[in-house]
Image (cartoon, rainbow, N blue to C red):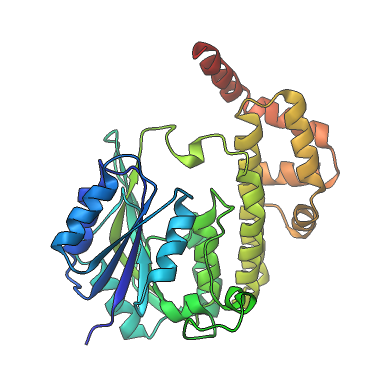
């Protein structure tokens, strides 16, 4: 008999997209599902839509909670699920009809703890779709994944999104296959929840942590879900987020833990370290230089960033690749903060001017 698979869907003011998303789940060819719709304090008709679907499909359970963000809603769903496997999906995304069946068959055939599928970015403005999928089916150990696929999967953003994966629930539970714990501290040590202080980077952080807990991983080359992209400027990644740089450091720790656990080669470690340097510097540019921060504020934030012990260790250990990383690492290693600040002002000058012009126009 097919095992129960829990699907966790955080819902917040998604009335425009909910029908499409829920229909894509209830119409799955794999039928043994537990569908958990978590309304995160919506102020539109989302909760009523969820209730209407629950009245028509006994597999659907609806929960309502105060608004706490997508990580909080997912954590609530994780605490309620009873399936042997689980997936997450955002309310504005939707699945391919055979998505769950393909992932489930892959993990059963390869005896894996996780299946990773491809996805397509679908743009609201009608731009051509962007397909992100691996070229062929694959299965192997965590060590093989770390050394063969971690870097290309990071580049394809197949690691970044947590919704393109089927997870074995015992990996989420850690070493304890159940929910009974002697203390909250013991529970925290064995169960992985989303970090609710991370408003960005939380998906790739969770994916990296879950991959670290697996023994075997398999890959499905087909597109299994469709990732809805809103109008330009309307996503978290494109908006100013003062917490953005801070969230890079839990992510850095998770990636480094994954590299250790998978016994990654020195070359893979260096490639991932390069990507984390680029990632952190990119978020610094977004948070400071492409926002309303004054030049003085930008300089002070970069000064603090360059003094962080985790960042200093990364800069010392990495062998920089690519022009941008070479320049950034050389200047920051030597503590030439003002030169790096000037480099950023030059690099983001046009975007800074556009930002301040748009703010002036709104007054």
* Residue under the image location 55 percent in, 79 percent down: 143
Relative vertical location of residue 189 with respect to residue 116 in this rendering, above or below: below
Give the image quarter of residue 251: bottom right
Q: Nearer the viewer, residue 111 or 326?
A: 111
* Residue under the image location 29 percent in, 57 percent down: 225
Q: In the image, residue 28 lies at what x, y percent?
A: 19, 66
Q: Nearer the viewer, residue 185 or 338?
A: 185
Q: Nearer the viewer, residue 49 or 194?
A: 49
Q: Residue furthest left?
A: 56
* Residue under the image location 54 percent in, 74 percent down: 191
* Residue under the image location 65 percent in, 47 percent down: 280
Give the image quarter of residue 8: bottom left
147 horizontally vs 319: left or right = left
Give the image quarter of residue 276: bottom right
Relative vertical location of residue 346 with respect to residue 318 in this rendering, above or below: above
351 horizontally vs 95: left or right = right
């Amino acid at each position: 008999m097919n095992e129960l698979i829990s699907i966790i869907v955080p819902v917040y003011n998604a009335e425009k997209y909910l029908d499409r998303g829920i229909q894509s789940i209830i119409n799955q060819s794999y039928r043994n599902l537990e569908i958990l719709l978590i309304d995160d304090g919506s102020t539109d008709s989302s909760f009523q839509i969820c209730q209407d679907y629950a009245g028509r499909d006994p597999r659907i359970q609806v929960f309502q909670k105060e608004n706490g963000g997508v990580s909080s809603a997912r954590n609530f769903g994780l605490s309620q699920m009873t399936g042997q496997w689980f997936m997450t999906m955002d309310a504005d995304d939707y699945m391919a009809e055979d998505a769950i069946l393909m992932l489930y068959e892959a993990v059963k055939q390869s005896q894996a703890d996780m299946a990773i599928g491809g996805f397509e970015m679908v743009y609201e403005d009608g731009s051509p779709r962007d397909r992100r999928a691996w070229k062929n089916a694959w299965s192997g150990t965590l060590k093989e994944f770390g050394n063969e696929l971690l870097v290309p999967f990071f580049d394809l953003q197949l690691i970044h999104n947590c919704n393109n994966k089927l997870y074995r629930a015992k990996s989420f539970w850690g070493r304890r296959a159940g929910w009974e714990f002697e203390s909250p501290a013991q529970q925290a040590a064995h169960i992985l929840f989303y970090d609710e202080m991370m408003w960005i980077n939380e998906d790739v952080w969770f994916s990296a942590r879950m991959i670290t807990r697996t023994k075997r991983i398999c890959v499905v080359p087909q597109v299994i879900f469709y990732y809805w992209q809103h109008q330009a400027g309307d996503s978290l990644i494109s908006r100013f987020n003062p917490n953005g740089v801070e969230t890079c450091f839990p992510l850095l720790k998770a990636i480094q833990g994954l590299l250790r656990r998978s016994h990654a080669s020195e070359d893979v470690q260096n490639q991932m370290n390069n990507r984390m340097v680029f990632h952190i510097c990119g978020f610094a540019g977004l948070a400071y230089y492409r926002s309303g921060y004054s030049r003085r504020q930008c300089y002070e934030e970069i000064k603090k960033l360059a003094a962080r012990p985790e960042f200093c260790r990364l800069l010392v250990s990495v062998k920089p690749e690519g022009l941008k990383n070479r320049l950034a690492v050389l200047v920051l290693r030597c503590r030439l903060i003002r030169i790096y600040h000037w480099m950023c002002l030059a690099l983001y000058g046009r975007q800074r001017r556009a930002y301040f012009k748009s703010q002036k126009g709104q007054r």
